[in-house]
Image (cartoon, helix red, strand yellow):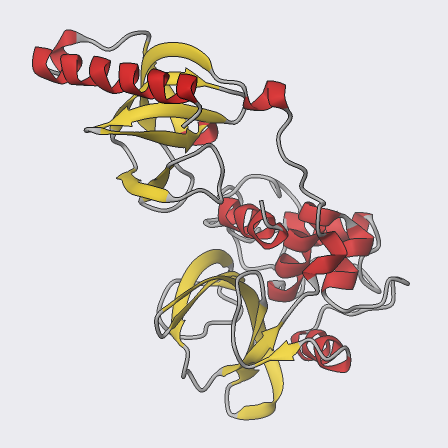
Amino acid sequence: MLPQYKVIDIATEEVGYLEKANANDLDDKTANAGSANYTKYSRDLWAVKYFNGAKQGVAWCAVFVSWCYFQAFGKTKALKLQCQPTSNNSGAGCTSAMNYYKRKNRWSKTPEWGDQIFFYTKGDTSTCSHTGLVVGVEGNKVITIEGNTSAGPQVIPNGGSVCKKSYDLSNARIAGYGHPDWSIVDGEDTPPTEDNNKMTEVNYMAKVVAASGSTVNLRAQPSTDAQKLYAVPVGNTVQVIAESTDWCQIIYGQQIGYMMRKFLEKTTSTPTGSSSSSIDAAWNDLLIAVEKMRIALGK
């Protein structure tokens, strides 16, 4: 997995988190919701003295971005990725965070996956008041995950939640993008061991689940870098025919592929006759046989 995808996966899991009214229930996504800017992100970063002071109770969009890098790679490497000093004297302000990238010549007007996006303060192009993570670039759109915002097409600082959003690349509020030096963490995410990647034959039905989003990717191989075959809607039922520590091999419709195990919730031990016709069952058996032959031949 490329290191930027590791950060994006962490951010994606946080979508839907709401800031808290006080220091209670910080780890629960929605409990104790309030407008006092209390979050687990500020708590966790203060515990390792990531910034030059505690940031609990203050606007937390930049804190959220730093937390995602920190969760992926630890304090020292996260600070280096953000071009910030490692001596506990960096702040969490958007403008200062932007300037750290600029001083290291890691500033761009073109977004890339894993970048830190910065937004101008409304009516003031000399400062920034909001930031987030770039999680995709699609046509003329940049896709982001942001902390301390809310749903809607506008740039919304201090919105109180973690949201996935999109903007036109030409949006006048976009100041630019801080581009981390990913060579700092190249090789950080080692491939799965043979044991972790080994598939064991099973046969059960499972429901597709996700903390956020409406679909989950079905892939050609058990890897997040593999070709995407289909986007399976959340709530649909699939047949699981093999599993490893992190992945399941499944049948969905007439397609066979791989889905991350964390997105599947077992519903029945074996496929039931009421869920598919005899023709469907025969077709599934054929798909399984062909896949076994393909694996045996090493193709």
Q: In the displayed structure, does residue 289 sit left or right of residue 138?
A: left
Q: Position of residue 31 (x, y in %)?
A: 51, 41
Q: In the displayed structure, does residue 67 sit left or right of residue 239?
A: right
Residue extending farthest front: 297
Q: Is residue 3 above or below residue 128?
A: above
Q: Residue at x 39, y 10 (%)?
A: 202
Q: Position of residue 215 (x, y in %)?
A: 32, 43
**The N terminus appears in which quarter of the rendering?**
top right
Q: Position of residue 245 (x, y in %)?
A: 54, 21
Q: Residue at x 47, y 50 (%)?
A: 15
Q: Is residue 86 above or below residue 43?
A: below
Residue 180 visible at all: yes
The image quarter in which residue 240 lies? top left
Q: Is residue 1 above or below residue 180?
A: above
Q: Position of residue 124 (x, y in %)?
A: 56, 92
Q: Residue at x 76, y 69 (%)?
A: 83
Residue 17 visible at all: no
The image quarter in which residue 66 lies? bottom right
